[in-house]
Every structure is written in C-alpha cells, then in structure tokens.
Amino acid sequence: MSHLDNIPSTPGKYKPDKAFRFNSSAASSSLSKLTLYSTLFLSVLLIFLLLLYSPSSKPSLRRHLSTGSHRTPLSLSHKLIRKSARPHSTTGNTVLVTGAAGFVGTHVSLALKRRGDGVLGLDNFNHYYDPTLKRARQKILEKAWVFVVEGDINDKGLLEQLFDAVLFTHVMHLAAQAGVRYAMQNPGSYVHMSKSANLQPAIIWASSSSVYGLNSKVLFSEKYRTDQPASLYAATKKAGEEIAHTYNHIYGLSLTGLRFFTVYGPWGRLDMAYLFFTKDIMKGKTITVYESPDKGSVARDFTYIDDIVKGCLGALDTAKKSTGSGGKKRGPAQLRIFNLGNTSPVPVSTLVSILEKILKVKAKKKVVPLPRNGDVEFTHANITLAMMELGYKPATDLEAGLKKLVRWYLSFYSRSKKKSS
C-alpha cells in the first residue's frame, strides 16, 4: 500500500470543475515564432547549475522568508530550516528537494524523511494546476516535519541563504514546468536565467521519457538517440541532459538524471489522463481517447509512484560525491542517466477499461486521432541499467495502482466537497 494511501486529505475550499479543466488543443505558431522559441527553452536544470557554480558574495539576510500562505520571520525560518534538514542518524543525508510540493516531490520527501534523512523542501507553488492540491500536499509534509520554503529556484538571494544555512549532501531536483502541451503554449515558462551559490552536492534530477521523441525502436534504452524531440517540453529535458554533461565535465559535479515514464498514483496532477478520466467517467461525461494513425491505441508505460520513489532513493544512495571545489574540477565525476518505468506499456483503451471496472461505471468514449501537439504514440522503458545499478524493480501493476489512486481520489474529492459546502 502506498505510504500516502491512508493519509487524509487536507480540508479546504476545493473547486473541482475549475481544477480539472483540461485544454488538449495544440497551440499554433508561425515558423518565426518557433525559431525564436527554440532559442529560449533552456531547462530549469541549467538555472540550478548556474546557481550552484556562479561566484557570489555573502548574501544580505532578508527580513522574511515566504512560507506557505504567510510569511515567517527569518529567525524562525532558519530554525525550522535547520531542524527540517537535520538527519535523524549519523549516516543520514541532508537533502534539498526542489518541487517538494509537487506530485513526485512530496512522495520522495516523505520517503527520505521516514528513513531518517534530513529534508528541506523548496517550491514556488505556481498555478500551472490548481495550487489547492499543492497546499494539501504541503500540509502532509508539515505533519511529517518537512519544512517547505516557498520560493523560486531563480531567486539568487533565497538560494544563497539556504545554502548558507545548510550544508546539503544531495539535491533532489524535481522542480520543473510539467506538461507537454503547456510547453507549446507557454515556452517562456521554461526559461529562467540566474546565478547563486558555490556549493557542490551530488545532484539527482528529473528528466523524462519524452526525450526519446520520435524514436521508433521498441524498448527505449538509454543508449538510443534522443536528438529528435517531439515537443518543446522534450527539448528542454534533452537540453538539461546536455547541460548536465557539460557541467560534469567542466566542474566535476556528480549528476544523475532519471527519465520518468508516465508516473501515476495518489496525489497526482489533476491534468493527467488517469485523473480527468476518473472524474469525467464518474460524472457521466464523454472522454476523449486518442488513437494512432494506423487506428491502433496509444500506449503508455504507466509507472506507479511508489516504484518511482524507490528508483529516486536508489539513485541518491548510489550517487558519488562531486569532485569539484570552488568552481574547479579536481577529478572525473559521476554522470549517469537511468530509465524509471514499469516496462509494461498498456494501451490507453485498457486504462479506461480498468477504470470502468473499478468505478463500476461504463465510460462514454469519443475516439479521435492523436493530435500533432507533442505527444507520441507509445512509450516503453528498458530498465535493465536501473535494475543493475540502482536495484530498481517496479512491483505495482496498473490495476493495483489504479485502485489505490481511485481510493485516494474519492476520499480527497468527498472531503473537499463537504468542506466547501
């Protein structure tokens, strides 16, 4: 059972119709605009690396740090920060988790804290999807004594304060703009330029299966080419991997990239198909199911969140120390890329059938061709490398995972609805 399955959702005003609104139309743009955008999609990873390696002077302390829906006095914030980041054992790690109030970030933060690591969260609580869900996740983290600083990873002063207050052994970099289609409509949201501290922890960061793009080989391997992205989102993830190689080579930074394959589970993003399918099926609304050009079903390598968490922790535990100091490389440093998937792709039509079975409701379906908006026909992870080096072994099949997901969704929705009424 997921470690979040039995945690009650946070009461609060919740507007499901607005939260679940989903726009699947592809944004059109001229060739000149696409050319311009192609110069802008530096990934969030670039920013974080620049923040780590740019020389900076001692920061002047702010009067307040923004946390949650209020501001906490700096003296109190520093106490909370140090307490949250303090390991519970002499062998524990001290981990900064960016995107801590996100779907994967919340689960990873809780898993790290539960085993005794010190964890400090950082999240900007943006409005890509309803922040009510992020605030609910934040409450869960607070109950587990994981403090989440509200701020942007592009905020130089804030990051300098955090790295000045805590000596991090690792950074679990999960902050990024989610969503393939959103990147086409708002590519500028992926672009941030800033600089900050000069500490060199080992970094584990979230890449994506989307980097395989137009690859047609079955079983996506880390050895396959990834130079044909099908979306701007994929291009930023690919750019992040290339930038990681550069910083590893020049500065001796230990870097591990994890290519996630369609992560699902409790507390997931409300714009993902498995959740808005659940919502619309329950309401008797028609759902749109895409088919490939040859009339086949679009398939995804759905991977349950608990399996992804195990892969993230395995990557952190096997990450070697960075070899740089003061922005100078002292020797070769570790650089790795792993697929984290379930290695069992399932047609989306089968996903719908399983949801019908769990919900005991027949779905109203509209089958349409897959739009040319950055989505690909199928994903299929080769996880041999992760199994050998990280001990990664996915253990949750789609039906078992969806049962847990639906149980959480029904609980969260009903509690939020009662609170609103």
Image (cartoon, helix red, strand yellow):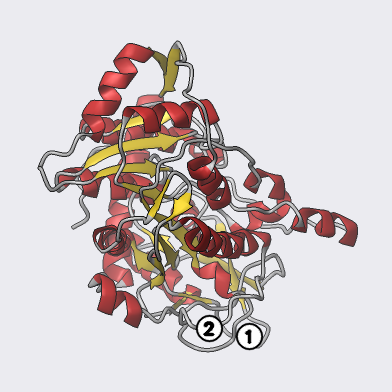
Residue 224: image tag: 2
Q: Nearer the viewer, residue 133 or 360?
A: 133
Q: Nearer the viewer, mark 1 or mark 2?
A: 2
Q: Could you tell me residue 199's position as x and y percent?
A: 40, 41
Q: Which residue is mark 1?
A: 295
> Which is more toward the observer, 420 or 381?
381
**Residue 6 as seen in the image, left or right of residue 334:** left
**Mark 1 or mark 2, earlier in chain:** 2
Percent of width and height locating residue 355: 38, 65
**Mark 1: few/some/many CA within 10 Å (<14, 14-19, 20+):** few
Which residue lies at the image location 47% right of the left edge and 61% below the top edge? Answer: 248
Q: Residues within 10 Å of mark 2 (few under 14, many from 20)?
A: few
Residue 123 lies, in percent from the top left, at: 44, 36
State whether residue 22 appears in this view. Answer: yes
The location of residue 211, given as percent across then percent down, is 56, 70
Nearer to us in this view, 307 or 316: 316
Residue occupying the point 22% across, 49% down? 111
In the rendered view of the protein, which quadrant contains the C terminus? top left
Residue type (three-letter) at the residue carrying disc 1: Lys
- Residue 141 vs 38, above or below: the answer is above
> Of the residues shown, which amino acid type is indicated by label 2?
Tyr
Secondary structure, mark 1, is loop
Residue 240: image quadrant is bottom right
- Between 289 and 92, the one lying in front of the other is 92
Circle 2 sits in a helix, a strand or a loop, which is it? loop
